[in-house]
Image (cartoon, grey):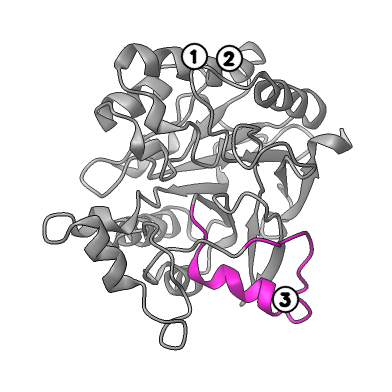
């Protein structure tokens, strides 16, 4: 995909006349066609109170095990899309592990979301996964790109990457080393090398085009390996929020954080997946955040249901201001 095609999104995203732009990221809707109505009531309330300029759905946007046909997918995506389409709010979705569980061809699945007028997702062809894209935010009074929102598909469980050689139980036994040997016993997916290189090379193209690095936010479902640093070192990382849940990280460290540090454009990363965690801390100059969970179908009814706000100022786009907001606070 050429840089020109990337910049020209379906709905142009632009800073408001006051120089502000608000992003709302909410993850783990994790509903089915027979949904819990409280989830979509919470989403609608978030939109009406927070008034975002862009919404990112942070993965596990459905409970994919319960969606088997194209008709079921269409019915469900229609439910998800309705709050944003009725309010004319641009929105995009990234894939989580449960989105990969849907029993429909993944290109058809992604295309169904993208068919809605206000959905600004795209899906780079030729690399692993579906929700790999970048959304440029234009200046309030020109077509200059001021800020980028990157998205990367963190994939299904790690067993998918080795299915050709090992069955799932063998994969689990191979990667689940004793704690004394390896600190992470997760079996979740990872961002693959071709995705990492797409981000890196496209970021370089933006810098060549505009003569500077474009400050950015990255959204991905499963947290980066380094996210645990901000919870284990809360004083040093100036960590706030709540993080009672053990991080379910990727099985392997894919090296994305190292690429982010080397490029120097991404200033914040936000993830879902660990439903109870909504912390944010700064590690090596990058904010590493979780946005909790907005869905009532997973983890039951808890007081921490919510989403994360990112406020960007056109005059200082590197200084991303973020906070988690609970539905009970609205």
Q: Mark 3 = which residue?
A: 237
Residue at image location 78% in from the left, 23% down from the top: 48
SS of the residue under disc 3: loop
| CB within 8 Å, label 2 to label 3 | no
**Horizontal and vertical percent position of residue 164:** 12, 55
Residue 207, percent from left and from top = 44, 59
- Mark 2 in CB contact with mark 1 (< 8 angstroms): yes
**Looking at the picture, does residue 325 appear above or below residue 267?**
above
Mark seen at residue 78? 1
- Image quadrant containing the N terminus: top left
Label 1 residue SS: helix
Q: Residues within 10 Å of mark 3 (few under 14, many from 20)?
A: many
Q: Is residue 283 in view from this perspective?
A: no
Q: Secondary structure at mark 2?
A: helix
Please tell me which residue lies in front, 166 or 114: 166
| Residue of label 2 | 82
Please name the residue shown 57% across and 49% down the image.
272
Query: What is the spatial separation of the Cα atoms under label 1 and label 3, in whole angstroms?
Result: 40 Å
Q: In terms of image quadrants, where is residue 233? A: bottom right
Which mark sits nearer the N-terminus, 2 or 3?
2
Q: Residue furthest left?
A: 165
Q: Which mark is residue 134?
A: none
Q: Is residue 68 above or below residue 316?
A: above
Q: Is residue 29 visible?
A: yes
Relative to 159, is 79 on the left or the right? right
Camera-side residue of 107 and 28: 28
**Bounds of the magenta span?**
222-245
Task: Please tell me how crowded label 2 is: few (under 14), some (14-19), or many (20+) other residues with Cα within 10 Å.
Answer: some
Place of residue 153 in the rendered image (x, y in percent of width and height, measured from the top left): 39, 48
């Amino acid at each position: 995909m050429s840089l020109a095609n990337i910049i020209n999104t379906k709905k142009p995203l632009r800073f408001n006349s006051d120089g502000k732009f608000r992003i709302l990221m909410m993850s783990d809707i994790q509903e089915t066609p027979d949904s819990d109505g409280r989830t979509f009531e919470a989403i609608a309330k978030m939109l009406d109170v927070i008034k975002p300029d862009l919404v990112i759905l942070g993965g596990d946007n459905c409970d994919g095990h319960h969606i088997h046909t194209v008709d079921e997918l269409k019915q469900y995506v229609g439910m998800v899309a309705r709050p944003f389409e009725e309010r004319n709010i641009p929105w995009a979705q990234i894939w989580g592990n449960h989105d990969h569980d849907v029993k429909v061809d993944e290109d058809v699945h992604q295309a169904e979301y993208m068919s809605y007028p206000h959905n600004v997702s795209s899906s780079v062809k030729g690399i692993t996964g579906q929700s790999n894209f970048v959304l440029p935010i234009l200046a309030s009074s020109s077509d200059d790109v001021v800020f980028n929102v990157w998205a990367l598909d963190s994939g299904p469980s790690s067993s998918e990457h080795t299915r050709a050689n090992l069955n799932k139980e063998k994969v689990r036994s191979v990667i689940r080393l004793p704690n004394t040997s390896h600190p992470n016993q997760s079996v979740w997916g990872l961002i693959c090398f071709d995705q990492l290189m797409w981000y890196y090379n496209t970021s370089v193209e933006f810098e060549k085009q505009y003569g500077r690095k474009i400050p950015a936010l990255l959204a991905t479902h499963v947290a980066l390996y380094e996210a645990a640093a901000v919870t284990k070192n809360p004083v040093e990382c100036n960590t706030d929020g709540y993080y009672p849940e053990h991080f379910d990280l990727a099985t392997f460290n894919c090296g994305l954080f190292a690429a982010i540090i080397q490029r120097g454009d991404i200033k914040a990363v936000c993830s879902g997946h660990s439903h109870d965690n909504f912390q944010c801390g700064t590690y090596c100059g990058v904010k590493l955040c979780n946005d909790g969970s907005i869905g009532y179908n997973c983890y039951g009814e808890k007081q921490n249901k919510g989403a994360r706000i990112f406020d960007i100022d056109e005059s200082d786009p590197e200084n991303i201001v973020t906070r988690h907001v609970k539905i009970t606070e609205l």
